Amino acid sequence: MVNDLLAGVIAGPQPVSRGLYIADIVEKLEALSPAEAAAKLGRMADVRAVAALDRPEFASAPDVLEMLPFPRAVQLVSQMAEDRAADVLAEMDEDTADRFLAALAPDVRTSLSSLLAWPEDSAGGMMTTEFVAAPSYASVGEVLRLIRTVERSRETVYSVFLVGREGRLEATISLRRLIAAEPDDLALDLGRGRDPVAVAPETDRKEVADLIRRHDLLALPVVDRNRCPIGIVTVDDVLDALVEEHTEGVQKFGGVEAFDKPYLETGFLAMIRKRAGWLSVLFLSEMLTASAMQHFEDELARAVVLTLFIPLIMSSGGNSGSQATSLIIRALAVGQVRLRDWWRVALRELPAGMVLGAILGTVGFVRIAAWQALGFYDYGSHWVLIATTVSAGLVGIVTFGSLAGSMLPFLLQKLGFDPASASAPFVATLVDVTGLVIYFTIALAILSGTLL
Amino acid sequence: MVNDLLAGVIAGPQPVSRGLYIADIVEKLEALSPAEAAAKLGRMADVRAVAALDRPEFASAPDVLEMLPFPRAVQLVSQMAEDRAADVLAEMDEDTADRFLAALAPDVRTSLSSLLAWPEDSAGGMMTTEFVAAPSYASVGEVLRLIRTVERSRETVYSVFLVGREGRLEATISLRRLIAAEPDDLALDLGRGRDPVAVAPETDRKEVADLIRRHDLLALPVVDRNRCPIGIVTVDDVLDALVEEHTEGVQKFGGVEAFDKPYLETGFLAMIRKRAGWLSVLFLSEMLTASAMQHFEDELARAVVLTLFIPLIMSSGGNSGSQATSLIIRALAVGQVRLRDWWRVALRELPAGMVLGAILGTVGFVRIAAWQALGFYDYGSHWVLIATTVSAGLVGIVTFGSLAGSMLPFLLQKLGFDPASASAPFVATLVDVTGLVIYFTIALAILSGTLL
């Protein structure tokens, strides 16, 4: 209730008339077909249409722009924030993007082309070239005057770069420190004694987000090999990148290749492709379970009762593995655990798996004993041995699952893969095959001479 | 290589002497035992110790503070950012926190107590009371002078609140617009025509992050029932909250209760508790597979060959379900799909599951035929019927898995639970039991009169 009352919203830096908020306009446009959205966008004032196009949530922007009359579309693109314009052009097919680039003013074309050269998930792909740079000999008052002049055309003015004689980045000064200082002070003095955080354009999106978060920055300079600033990544781009990373992370953990577009907008065939690949690989690996079972065929025929517990035991291994993997993937991602800590993790997971296995094993034993005692099911005269087999199997498989699930992300990272590729289905498959072998081996050891 | 050269970093707003960066100091302190860290922190200058304590990455800060001489600890806490100080006190046991509160200056005590009243993952728990507010009749020049005076003591000065006669929030003005305006302008004029975004203190952390991201804000006002500002949430707090949400999301999807502390710092017993709960619930549910198998006991005894494919078929259902769930959890979380879209999703997942099932079914059929033809294994004279059963079973189970996996998050949301509680193990368990029934029912239909 209180929330509803307070849900009034403010628009971004762009002024918006007639009381509609940009984020809401974008939501409405996204719900339309590209042709309808283009018709609607075509009737908007430039400032408003550009504000909408500037939002990364406007996923169909490339399609919508292609449906607009070309001169109008070019006019809009030329007014968009450069980092966003580059992202939108990157999503068009190459010919269309080239047509747009050719029609833009030379300076915009140069900036956009240089932004387009970097992969989307790198600092270069996230940055904008619209930053504020002042010479390192400028006074606080001079820098503030410069900010006032260029405010409208810059994505952020909260961080100002001070550059030396060869254009090298000497310091990053925050607007709050400029405001608090005396106008005659040397701006550079506010940044003395520290090296500014800066990244190369090829730096991964994840590392950019980590640095901004780690140092509580509002913006991060991107510099070339000579340490000359070529762009700036702002904190709002990082927020979007983090949410995208999260989506990819969950999809990967679910065993799906990351989707480029929202679920309902992804084509049916594209969706099948993203899912069928992993599903087939897992299926082929899982076929080893059939082979493992064939290997124990005689035992199966002699003691059909053993098969009753196969799904139970296998799934427990998969579940404990999936738990361990999810814990380690995140611990690695946020830097709580390093590659070299693998043995510390193993030394925790081994006893943890044994305790968890013992808990499940006890429950399993009680279940079989109860069913036998209450007459729900007759496991035969050897029911104690069967219950022991199941319990021991659970301890073995949950221990193996926890250990394998926790070590897999380390192994993947060591081999140069993303540790987040260790999906729940991947771990389950890994544990299933081994789990069967563990179960039947224990069964042979315990039941040999009686049932087997 | 380039990255290493550029890895120089800047510290946060706090000035840092002697060339060490706060984030690095925090990392070093975190690697020590609380006692060692307290000894080290005790030897630091106040400004530096406070800057370190202010970082949320300094997870052992509560323990470290308790080990410092009490007067010194109180002195440090009183200088910390209020939102962080409240978080740190919230993690101490109640008696210790009360002792700290009692020793603090009355105004700090009042702010901290009011912050402590809100749950950690609400807007009230994330906010700080250190915001800048100016009367709504102030000129741009007056507001800028105010900012200059209070800059040192405020968490952010990039958003200024303009409050009316009864203390109600009338507008939020960004520093960049103030800088660009004329000193004699009315500050309120810069914010005319829009309602400021604001939230109630009980608003969930996730909603706060969504609003800040949606509207590209640097800070979000928190207001009481009368719309009077009581705090401010800044974008850096949201970054931290997003990363934490992500960790919780992955852990939940892996079937683990969210961890409060980093993996290696979580006690062994606490870790077992967080994992054993879900594992046992899943285990008890999965016991239904044993019951389902008992139900088909006669069929199993007559056609042991059917058991060979149980793990393969079950895992395929679990994998396709886990894929569908991960897609829908994220689509719901980022708002690409709403509750009312459930039937659109179902209409996509039904054919998608059938196609994916047909792909796996074909592979499965070929596998059985190949093994039979190549003499790797003899499935008996009815091998075609067995292969057909397995293929049809795969189609049925993968379809059911995709459908169940995609609908479960909707169902959970509808029932008022977090849709992200639909973990991969949860879906797998759900699909396993039904999958067995589907498999055996199909087997009965196809093999009745021959094998069964």
Image: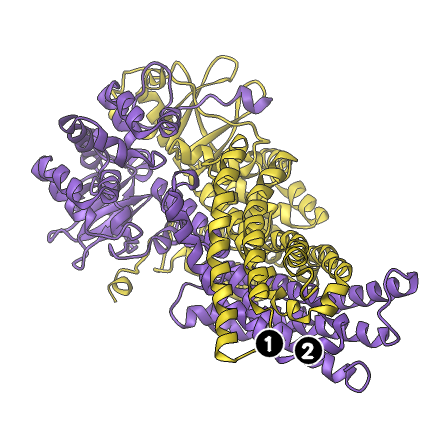
Chain colours: A purple, B yellow
Q: Position of residue B322 (x, y in %)?
A: 54, 53
**Residue B46 visible in the displayed image:** no
Q: Are marks 1 and 2 in contact (CB under 8 Å)?
A: yes
> Which amino acid type is shown beneath numbered disc 2?
Phe
Looking at the picture, does residue B160 appear above or below residue B337?
above
Residue A370: x and y, percent? 88, 63
Say what amino acid the circle numbered 1 marks: Ala
User: How many C-alpha atoms fall within 10 Å of the one at disc 1: few (<14), some, or many (≥20)?
Assistant: some
Q: Horizontal placement of A217 versus B394: left or right?
A: left
Query: Badge 2 is on which residue?
Result: A440
Looking at the image, which is closer to me, B202 or A197? B202
B424 lies above or below B176 = below
Res B298 visible: yes
Q: Are the residues under marks 1 and 2 on the same chain?
A: yes
Q: Element type at marker 2?
A: helix
User: Who is closer to the viewer here, A118 or B29?
Assistant: A118
Residue at 54% across / 19% down in the picture? A5
- State the mark number for residue A292: 1
Q: B111 and A238: which one is in front?
A: A238
Q: Nearer the viewer, residue B357 or A343?
A: B357
Q: List the single residue furthest toward the bottom.
A: A449
- Asked if residue A158 is positioned above or below residue B160 in the image, the reply reads below
The quadrant in which residue B301 appears is: bottom right
The chain ID associated with circle 2 is: A
Residue B413: image location, x then y, percent:
60, 37
